[in-house]
Image: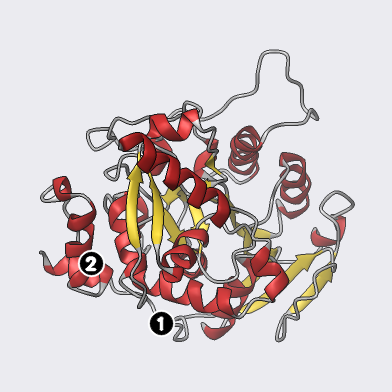
């Protein structure tokens, strides 16, 4: 086992666990060294930052890290969140309404991290066109035009990773400005709006699945929590499929550093730095628990026959999807760093255990334990 794999999973037991789950993984992947993370020491020079959002999932850590680095922070929100943000100026405004009050102000960098509608971006870029030197837009890898998710059993190990030049969504022929747009299209349109409004002054970051403590979607939380509970765990499909996620703390801290450095351009931002399999991801979760979780790999064909929903019932699972194998080399070359997956899994488990009981009992994603048990029994019955 390489030193870099030890660095990434922070335990020599993890690879052994992954190979026990799927012996064919031996030699299947190579790890680049995990780059050193940036602790929140003060930046070389303070900047004035405007964060559009700041109280949602990725906002609070962005604010916290920026303040720790010595920056002056203003946030713009609707004021509906109960999250308290100390040490910042707070502008109350609705992005569906008038933003003209921003035009008379000046900031070094605007971080737009909560745009769920391209029309929000039209309003904010218009208001801020002459108010900032850099507009940093948090988009999504969902802006890429890739096939719909399906029960694909073939390994994607030989697939060409999705780079920043991959085809993005474009509006249909009958679409007109002002029409509603699905998520991937609204992100692609928003990117175009930002580049048009800030030519040479735009930074577009396309994250993959953002995970970790405080994630309200539970789209990855299911796995470390389920593994921590122990027992027989239903593991979906081909264990050699790719798995990519990014800890929200790694993403948000890098966003602040991009603002500090004035780095422009388009960047994919998911992780880790090199290919990770689903089996390795599960082994990484198990390595930080004391549970005796046992993984039973159930085929895509069986899951399809039982109508088990990709992504929602089996969170963070998109078998063979190109968006689970995205090239992040440009982001890494420009300072994106990763904490070990083990840290993310451990911190997510600890955070989840501190949640209110009612919230834990009604997580936003993941198959129920009763349904999992039923499926495993049927699987064993069919396998004889």
- Image vertical order of residue 291 relative to residue 324, above or below: below
Name the foreground residue: 206 vs 100.
206
Depth-wise, is mark 2 or mark 1 nearer the camera?
2
> Element type at marker 2?
helix
Left or right position of 197 against 80: left
Instruction: Give the structural element (helix, strand or loop) at label 1.
Output: loop
Is residue 257 rendered to the left or right of residue 342?
A: right
x and y percentages locating residue 327 in the rendered image: 33, 44
Query: Is residue 82 depicted above or below 314 in this figure?
Result: below
What residue is shown at x 65% (from left), y 38% (from top)? 183
- The mark nearer the N terminus, 2 or 1, is 2
| Contact check, label 2 and label 1, Cβ < 8 Å | no
Instruction: Name the residue located 89 percent from the left edge and 51 percent from the top edge.
Output: 97
Please state the horizontal and vertical placement of residue 161, each as a whole percent of the image: 31, 38
Q: Is residue 264 visible?
A: yes
Residue 250: x percent and y percent?
Answer: 44, 67
Quarter-wise, where is residue 159 in the image? Answer: top left
For disc 1, the marked residue is: 39
In three-dimensional space, the C-alpha distance between marks 2 and 1, rounded to whole angstroms, equals 26 Å
Nearer the observer, 24 or 169: 24
Q: At x 49% / y 52%, what residue is drawn?
A: 373
The quarter in which the C terminus is drawn is top left
| Image height of 169 relative to 232, above or below | above
Farthest right residue in view: 98
Q: Which residue is mark 2?
A: 14
Residue at the location (52% across, 62% down)?
221
Image spot of residue 49 (x, y percent):
63, 70
């Amino acid at each position: 086992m390489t030193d870099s794999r030890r660095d990434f999973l922070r335990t020599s037991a993890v690879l052994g666990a992954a190979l026990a789950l799927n012996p064919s993984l031996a030699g299947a992947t190579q790890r680049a060294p995990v780059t050193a993370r940036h602790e929140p020491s003060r930046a070389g020079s303070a900047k004035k930052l405007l964060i559009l959002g700041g109280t949602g999932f990725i906002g609070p850590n962005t604010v916290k890290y920026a303040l720790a680095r010595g920056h002056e922070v203003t946030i713009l929100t609707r004021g509906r969140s109960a999250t308290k943000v100390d040490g910042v100026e707070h502008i109350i405004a609705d992005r569906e309404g008038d933003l003209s009050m921003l035009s008379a102000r000046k900031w070094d960098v605007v971080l737009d991290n909560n745009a769920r509608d391209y029309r929000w971006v039209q309003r904010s870029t218009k208001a801020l066109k002459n108010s900032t030197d850099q507009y940093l837009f948090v988009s999504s890898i969902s802006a890429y035009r890739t096939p719909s998710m399906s029960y694909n059993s073939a390994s994607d190990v030989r697939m060409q990773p999705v780079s920043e030049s991959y085809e993005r969504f474009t509006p249909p022929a009958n679409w007109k400005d002002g029409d509603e747009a699905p998520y991937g299209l609204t992100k692609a349109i928003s990117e175009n709006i930002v580049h048009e409004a800030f030519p040479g002054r735009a930074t577009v970051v396309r994250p993959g699945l953002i995970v970790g403590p405080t994630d309200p979607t539970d789209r990855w939380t299911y796995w470390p929590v389920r593994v921590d509970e122990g027992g027989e765990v239903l593991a979906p499909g081909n264990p050699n499929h790719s798995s990519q996620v990014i800890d929200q703390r790694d993403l948000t801290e890098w966003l602040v550093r991009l603002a500090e450095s004035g780095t422009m351009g388009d960047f994919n931002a998911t992780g880790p730095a090199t290919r990770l399999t689903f089996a390795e991801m599960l082994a990484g979760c198990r390595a930080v628990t004391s549970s005796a979780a046992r993984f039973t790999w159930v085929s895509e064909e069986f899951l399809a026959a039982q109508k088990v929903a990709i992504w929602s019932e089996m969170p963070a699972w998109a078998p063979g999807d190109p968006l689970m194998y995205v090239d992040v080399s440009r982001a890494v070359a420009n300072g994106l760093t990763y904490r070990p997956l083990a840290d993310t899994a451990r911190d997510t488990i600890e955070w989840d255990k501190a949640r209110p009981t009612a919230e834990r009992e009604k997580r936003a994603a993941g198959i129920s334990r009763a349904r999992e048990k039923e499926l495993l029994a049927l699987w064993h019955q069919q396998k004889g």
